[in-house]
Image (cartoon, grey):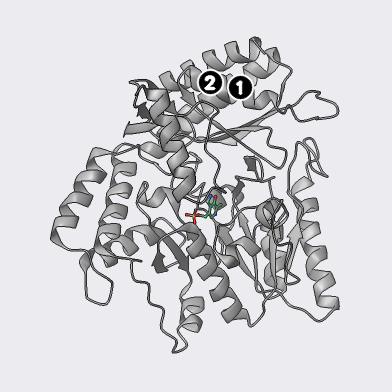
Amino acid sequence: LGHEERDLALKTERKQVVGTNLSISYQKNLKITRGALQYLYDDKGDTYIDCVNNVSHVGHCHPVVVKTMQKQLVKLNTNTRYLHDSLVTYAKMLTATLPPKLNVCYFCNSGSEANDLAIRISRHFTKQKDVIVLDHAYHGTSTVAMELSPYKFDSKGGSGQQPYIHKGMNPDLYRGHYRYGDEHAGEKYAEDIADIIKQLSDKGTGIAAFICETLLGVGGQIPLPDGYLKAVYSHVRAAGGLCIADEVQVGFGRVGEKFWGFELQGVEPDIVVLGKPIGNGHPLAAVVLTEEIAAAFNNGLEYFNTYGGNPVSMETGIAVMNVISEEELQQRALETGNYLIEGLKKLMEKHVIIGDVRGKGLFVGAELVRNRETLEPAVPEIDVVVEQMRDRGFLISTDGPFHNVLKIKPPMVFNIENAASFLTNLDEVLGGL
Ligand code: PMP
């Protein structure tokens, strides 16, 4: 059988034995068989530059991370009911990157699980149930995380908004209610959260938490407007709620200028949720919070997590942090990200289809529109762009409520040369539309 027949047969078998409400990227089948840093290789011998996988943070199969994992796997992998050095070492390394007040860690296995736990803890601490989220947000796939995710509960097949979940406006300066040029947009968007709190309070309802990403991912690759979180956090705290920062996509140096997304906003959350990049693809996630909140959570009911905090995960986490600092990947994200964003802005002058370019470091979005006045989304044009870029060896993807934002968030080892060839190819693809 040739590659195409084999791929087709595999796809047919997959449909029989794996749940099918999971789409496969690309019209033409892509079977990736190996990865090395920012490069992926398919079964046909073609090489791709991965421009979108922010989970393989320090690069696919990074040799230092892989070796560390192998070494620990042959020694021990068990749960956290015994003493183990790596658990404490990693927790100390992690908390050293955070504001001093965020000094207690809980480990788990996925971003969804971590968000779920963060909400449980906040409800416990505040004795309230209601949570404010941002429109179009995605926080994961567990039952609680789905309830926090308008991207899921508002979409086809979704189960709708729960009465104790409240949606704030997506603070989108390009397409939202307040736009670029309005210096007070941050505070104005924050007023929307204040209004929700007020309406609840008028009914005698308090809030447990406000949760948002510190740059919006699924919401459309959107950096938050200046002053936004400062104002929101102050409204939320005045109402007795906790402020949760979902750093699952954006944390760990990706935004370049800072290690954490919330630092760009000059705020300190009460609870931080970490996932994806921290294990470089190994299932590792964490909730980090203050001693006061942790103490309240420790009310006699045990928190045990079979895999969370196991020695292999902890050694993996340590290795990832070491690689970030040894290879100066945060600095690299800043330099490469600035180069990429500037390059995209130049392409915007040439191609009217690019309506907006935004981002920080290696967390970048380019919004494609048919008309810069009406902002009509350029769909399905964007799908053509993604397919043609794939044909040229670049894997990118789309996001945003209208599915018209090119999302670029490569492994942090993505370099200036990769960015330059990405820009050249995107220029040609857009020119040929
Ligand atoms: N939070 C955010 C912001 C995410 O993007 C995701 C995953 N896309 C999650 C949480 C859930 O993480 P996981 O898939 O590891 O459960």
Residue ID for mark 1: 385
- Residue 223 pos. (x, y %): 63, 42
Secondary structure of the residue carrying numbered label 2? helix
Residue ID for mark 2: 389
Query: Quadrant location of the C terminus?
Result: top right
Does any atom of ligand 1 lie closer than 8 Å to the CB of label 1? no
| Residue shown at 51% from the left, 70% from the top | 117
As displayed, is residue 2 above or below residue 247? above
Residue 397 in sight from this viewpoint: yes
- View extreme (bottom): residue: 300
| Residue type at the position of mark 2 | Met
| Residue shown at 65% from the left, 57% from the top | 149
Q: Nearer the viewer, residue 295 or 80?
A: 80
Does any atom of ligand 1 lie closer than 8 Å to the CB of label 2? no
Mark seen at residue 229: none
| Residue shown at 59% from the left, 14% from the top | 429
- Residue 62 pos. (x, y %): 28, 39
Give the side of residue 60 with respect to residue 268, left or right.
Answer: left
